[in-house]
Image (spheres, rainbow, N blue to C red):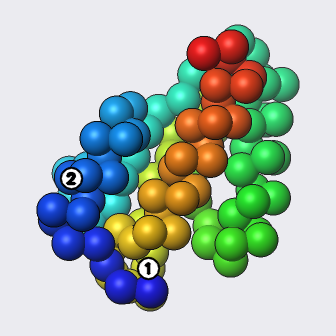
Amino acid sequence: MSRLTIEELKIALKRLPDWKLATEREAITRDFKFRDFDAAFSFMTRSALLAAKMDHHPEWFNVYNKVEVTLTTHDAGGVTQKDIELATAMDGYSALLTGG
């Protein structure tokens, strides 16, 4: 899978307004906040099951109701369509769990 061009990435991020480019490397990031740990863990579980099917794994950090996610495709050296697809799915899982 090849890296997205900067134009492709800009277009993709318009559809993912809560995601931002990482400052230290070519990746996209988003911070999620849930009502409690159970909701955050549910989000991570759903995301992990999809990531395993995609053979694409997020970098993430969880404390109580917060989950910080960074997506990049290491083999491609940057952001690919896989990252955009996983980010889109994560946004959907978050919406289900937060009602928005």
Q: Taking 47 as reference, is 7 above or below it?
A: below
Neighbor class of circle 2 (other Cα within 10 Å; few <14, some 14-19, many 20+) is: few
> Where does residue 31 sit, x and y in percent of width and height?
47, 33
- Left or right, 43 with respect to 26, comes to right
Reading the image, the residue beneath label 1 is 74
Q: Taking 37 as reference, is 92 above or below it?
A: below
Q: Nearer the viewer, residue 56 or 1?
A: 1
| Mark 1 or 2, closer to the camera | 2
Which quadrant is home to the N terminus? bottom left
The answer to whether residue 59 shows anywhere in this view is: no
> Where does residue 33 sit, x and y in percent of width and height?
57, 22
Numbered badge on residue 10: 2
Q: At x 44% / y 79%, what residue is drawn? A: 74
- Left or right, 3 with respect to 70, comes to left
> Where does residue 64 sit, x and y in percent of width and height?
69, 25
Q: At x 73% / y 43%, what residue is drawn? A: 44
Q: In the rendered structure, which amino acid carries the disc numbered 1?
A: His
Looking at this rendering, what residue extends furthest in the left direction? 7
Secondary structure beneath label 2: helix
Give the mark nearest the N terminus, 1 or 2. Answer: 2
1 and 2 marks in contact (CB < 8 Å): no
- How far apart are the two marked residues, 1 and 2, measured between alpha carbons? 20 Å
